[in-house]
Image (cartoon, coloured by chain):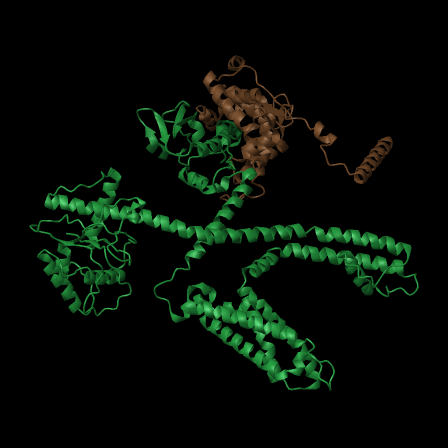
Amino acid sequence: MAAGVAAWLPFARAAAIGWMPVANLPMPVAPTEKNKRQDELIILNVSGRRFQTWRNTLDRYPDTLLGSSEKEFFYNEETREYFFDRDPDVFRSILNFYRTGKLHYPRYECISAYDEELAFFGIIPEIISDCCYEEYKDRKRENAERLMDDNEDNKDCKLPNMTFRETMWRAFENPHTSTMALVFYYVTGFFIAVSVITNVVETVPCGATPNQKDMPCGERYTEAFFCMDTACVMIFTVEYLMRLFAAPSRYRFIRSVMSIIDVVAILPYYIGLVMTNNEDVSGAFVTLRVFRVFRIFKFSRHSQGLRILGYTLKSCASELGFLLFSLTMAIIIFATVMFYAEKGSTSSKFTSIPASFWYTIVTMTTLGYGDMVPKTIAGKIFGSICSLSGVLVIALPVPVIVSNFSRIYHQNQRADKRRAQKKARLARMRISKTGSSSAFLHSKRNGLLNESLELTVRTGKTMSLLESQHHHLLHCLEKTTVRSYQLKGPTVGVGTGIIKNHEFMDEQLYEQSYLETALQSYPSRSPSLSSQGLTGTCCSRRAKKSSQLPNASAATSGLQELSAINIQCGDPPLSTSRSSLNMRPDDPPRLNCQSGQITTAIISIPTPPATTPDGDGHTLPNPSVQNIVKVSAL
Amino acid sequence: MSSCRKRCKKEIVKLAQYLFRLITGTLHSDSVEDELELSAVRHRPEGLEQLEAQTRFSRKELQILYRGFKNECPSGVVNEDTFKDIYSQFFPQGDASTYAHFLFNAFDTDHNGSVSFEDFVMGLSILLRGSVQEKLNWAFNLYDINKDGYITKEEMLDIMKAIYDMMGKCTYPILKEETPRQHVEIFFQKMDKNKDGVVTIDEFIDCCQNDENIMRSMQLFENVI
């Protein structure tokens, strides 16, 4: 039921008196309002801007936030108002919706911000009124396309377990993924070019031999051309078969345009092989050779511009269809007129209406070859009308096609630009993420030191309540899973304090990284006693052939790790800012774990260069190194 | 005949004008027709005190009523289409337009084709705050479509069909063709005392006052505002 109509409910109920006298049955009891609230003003404070409205206004839409009891959650007792910490500008349109029953979309608003506000206040976007609905839908579609482009790029990331077939398919689709794919890409491109050039050169008249007239090169060097053709077709066939094998859905692949082009490009050759040199079929054979020119379309896999053009034409199919239809109509009309106008004149070329088609087409497209010319006055008049109208008819759909092309082209440009920007953006995001996680570890280390060692360690900065709670949460997770966070250092040389990558690692990676770091992080000169234990650990780990993750119920080695806090000294104080990236590599290692009299063994490991651990039988992919801060849960 | 000729002349003039415009190519500016389009009739109700005196609503109630009224009809008057629209929204399943038409005629006491706020509020005042006599009077007025003082069977049948239309098609038990007619028969049996085929206002009021159910139902909408 619409908004303001709710105000007419009393009227509708009153009008029901008309039914009373004719009713045969007694009426039901009317509902009574228990506490009849007088209509009152309520104040909505949205980020400082106060809106006031009647309570009844808001009650018109009981399934939204403001209309239901959900707004009581936002009620502020002291100021006797409802406080919402949202955008006041967007709230304006939302409140107007309650007042007028129409939801408008302001053009200057960002579409996703608006959507979020609507979702917050429980209003579905479908009720945007007609005046603004189209704009809203357009912007939303544009935004969705943009996001879809971004998502498509995300699919490029390599999944850990891809079958050979999937790898091959990926290599075919994105040649930039591996060197092999790139090589293959260029080779096929080269052969397409060779094939096309061969076809062209075949027909050029080569120098005349003394005894024969000028003949095309194709007939002169038949062998050479045949070999070239065979080679190209071999390559294309192999490529096609490989694509067919690798395609995830073979049926769909066969139906796709590119595969049809491939087939059409190589089929004539095979048909030519099969057919004999018969007289009657050789005519058809020649026709088949024409299809070889379709190999040029294979270039569309290599050129994005071609693809855009093709896509544009497809999307403008209706405009093109209209153009064709109107042209046909006009051609028939004018051809008829011209034929009858020129019927009288002698030796006129306009012998029939279909013959006049040629004249009409040439005139309408303003070509004007001049092989057919009207001679009578009437013919000339109609001829001029024909050419004028031709200009109009052709000019009309062209801007639509052009604008479509321009839009798609710019979209592609934007997509490329966004991809480039995204890399930078992701890098920045990663920095801030690692900053926060390293802050966590830093604070944990200091916190643990504090609680167990009672060392006064300067934290360097005070943490906000939010941060401390976040860290507590991560700590709880560590305790729950009996794992611990680990930071991996980069592969760069000596003692760099750069934290590169931190993630929740999955088991396998964790295990790998743990192994390699465990093996490489214990150089010989560790002063304290427990380092022996740790090297014992690492030795024992080395001894263990099967790499198992240390879990709580694991062997002593596991427990040893768990009970060891292995802190990489030499970490300068980590801050959440980007300065962590700029840390000087040669900070002297600060041994802030002096005493050995602690329950938790704190090993100080200076930052030596990464010596390859002796006897390392593991071939680990990433012999990374230095700064490992492995903090185990106690 | 002369009107036909006059029409012909007008058409020829229009055609000549059109050809002229075609050849000289005037931009299609706002033609004369737009000026004739009257802006919506604006109506401002009488003052609050007067309405307060004329009706039985309090000041606050009138304020609330007017705000609701003005919200839906900013121009201050309701025409029949808007009226039907508004009323139909309360009965989504059926077709309330016929009954709304009768209601409109009942509210539009001065029969000028639109219901102003005064008409609206007067009607409501009778329906909600009036005496039983006044309410019955109003109901009789509603049923008497041609306002001749008698309710005939045809009028009653129209009203009955309109009421049943509001129910819509999906009812239980299913609405049959002769149901309204039967209902009208029952009504007339009850109301028409002298069996002359029509119901007058006195018969109507008498009969209703003697009917328990109807009396009780008249009190039903007391507390609507």
Residue A106: % across, % down: 51, 36
Position of residue A525 in the picture relative to residue B154 (left or right): left
Q: In this rendering, is residue A282 above or below A392?
A: below
Residue A497: % across, % down: 25, 51
Residue A129: % across, % down: 53, 38
Q: Is residue A248 visible to the viewer in this orientation of the structure?
A: no
Chain given the colour brown:
B
What's the residue at 50%, 20% (across, down)? Answer: B132
Q: In this rendering, is residue A473 above or below A249?
A: above
Decide which of A467, A10 is in the foreground and name it: A467
What's the residue at 25%, 41% (across, down)? Answer: A467
Q: In this rendering, is residue B197 above or below A468?
A: above
On the image, which quarter does residue B152 sit in?
top right
Q: Is residue A437 visible to the viewer in this orientation of the structure?
A: yes
Name the residue furthest left.
Answer: A597
Decide which of B119, B28 is in the foreground and name it: B28
Position of residue A203 in the picture relative to residue A429 (left or right): right
Indicate the colour of chain A. Answer: green
Decide which of B5, B14 is in the foreground and name it: B14
On the image, which quarter does residue B96 sit in?
top right
